[in-house]
Amino acid sequence: METQIIRMDEQHIDREQLAKAGEIIKAGGLVAFPTETVYGLGGDALNPESSKKIYAAKGRPSDNPLIIHIAKFQDLNLIVKEIPDLARKLAEAFWPGPLTMIFKKSDMVPYETTGGLETVAVRMPVHPVAMAFIEAAGGYVAAPSANRSGRPSPTLAKYVEEDMQGRIEMIIDGGGVKIGLESTIVDMTVEKPMILRPGFITKEMLEKVLQSVSEDQTMMSTDSGQVPKAPGMKYRHYAPKGDLTIVDGNEEQVIEYINREVSFLQEKGHKVGIIGTEATIARYCGDVCKSAGNRKDDNTIAKELYRILREFDDEDVTVIFSESFNTVGIGQAIMNRLLKAAGHKIIHL
Ligand code: AMP
Ligand code: MG
C-alpha cells in the first residue's frame, strides 16, 4: 500500500484534502492525523473492520481498547448509554481538549473498538485539523496513538511515517504537537470518577470541577499488586531499545552518580545516553546527552520526551540514564510515561 502524505497547518485548513481523508475513513481505510496531544491513527469507530485494521497496523493486542474521537458534544449521545451529570460538567470545562472520559457504551459501538468491554473511551480534541478531519470522516474516529505498539507515541508526522509507511492510506502532517503526552483518562462509570492515566489535565484541575476524584493506584507504582483499570496501561509501552534507568536525588548527587556509572559502562564497551535538563546537560559525560527541556516549565519536557526516546533508538545507545522529575502538575504524566519506559527502574540516591 502507498501511504499518501498531505500537509496543512492549523491556520490554513484545506477542506478539499480533508474531504478526501474523510472518504478514506468512510470506506474503511486508515488515516493518521495531528491532535494537540500526539498523532492519532484514525479509522471509522463504528465499523468493526476498521478497528481490526487499526490493531493490525499498530501490531497492538486487541484487548487494548481504542479512544473514539468526536468533534461535537451532541455526537456523544449516539455512542454512550447515558451521560452522567459530572461528565457534562467536565465536558463543559475541558472539551474540546486533552481529556478522555469513559462511558457505558451504546449498541452502536462495536466490541472490536472497545476491546470487548461494555465501556467506551471518548475524547473531543481541540486541534483544528483534528476537528475538521473528524467531521469530514462522519463524526466518529477511533484513534489510538499512531505508533507501532511498544514505541513512543509520535509527536511529529515523520515519526508516524517511520512506523506506518505502507501500512495505512494517508498521513495528515500538521507539524509538531503542542502537548506531547497522551490525554488524561477519567472513568465516569464509577460513583467517584477515577483517573486511569495522568495527562495535561491534572487531578487538581479536575477537582476544581468535581470536588473529589480518585486515582488508579497502579499509575505511579507497581507495588499495589493490582491490575491497571485502563487495559493499555498494563503493557510496557514507550520502551526505548537502550536499557533505561531513572536516577532520583538532588542535582549534584545525580550528576555525580550518573557520570561515575558512565565511565564504568564505557570501559565495558557501552554507548551511554543521558536525559538531562537545560541547567545540567552540559555537565554530563555520556556519549549522547539530550536536554528534555527547562525545569521551570514542565510543559517543555512533556513535549520533548517522546522525541528524545525515539532519537536514542536511532543512536544505538545501549544504556540510558534519565534525571527524575517532580510529580506536580503535568510532571505526574511525565513520570508515569518515563517510569513505564524504564520498566519502573528507578534509583533513589
Ligand atoms: P492510546 O489511544 O494509544 O493513547 O491508548 C488508549 C488508552 O485508553 C489505553 O490505555 C486504553 O487501555 C484506554 N482505554 C480505552 N478505552 C477504555 C475503556 N473503555 N476503559 C478503560 N480504558 C480504556
Ligand atoms: Mg498509545
Image: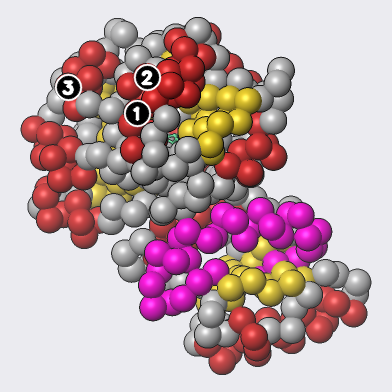
Q: Position of residue 255 (x, y in %)?
A: 62, 86
The type of residue carrying mark 1 is Ala
Disc 3 under 8 Å from ligand 1? The reply is: no
Please state the quadrant of the image where ligand 1 appears.
Answer: top left
Q: Secondary structure at mark 2?
A: helix
Q: Residues within 10 Å of mark 3 (few under 14, many from 20)?
A: few
| Residue 301 lies in the magenta stretch | yes
Do labels 2 and 3 touch, CB within 8 Å? no
Do labels 2 and 1 touch, CB within 8 Å? yes
**Relative vertical location of residue 279 with respect to residue 185 in this rendering, above or below:** below
In three-dimensional space, the C-alpha distance between marks 1 and 3, rounded to whole angstroms, equals: 16 Å
User: Label 1, on which residue?
Assistant: 132
| Residue 270 lies in the magenta stretch | no
Looking at the image, which is closer to me, 29 or 203?
Answer: 29
**Relative vertical location of residue 258 with respect to residue 113 in this rendering, above or below:** below
Q: Residues within 10 Å of mark 2 (few under 14, many from 20)?
A: many
User: Label 3, on which residue?
Assistant: 74
Q: Position of residue 128 (x, y in %)?
A: 34, 38
The type of residue carrying mark 3 is Gln
Q: Secondary structure at mark 3?
A: helix
Determine whether, in the image, residue 273 is placed left or right of residue 226: right
**Relative vertical location of residue 325 with respect to residue 177 in this rendering, above or below:** below
Q: Quadrant of the C terminus?
A: bottom right
Q: Position of residue 80 (x, y in %)?
A: 24, 19
Magenta segment: 292-321
User: Label 2, on which residue?
Assistant: 136
Give the mark nearest the N terminus, 2 or 3.
3
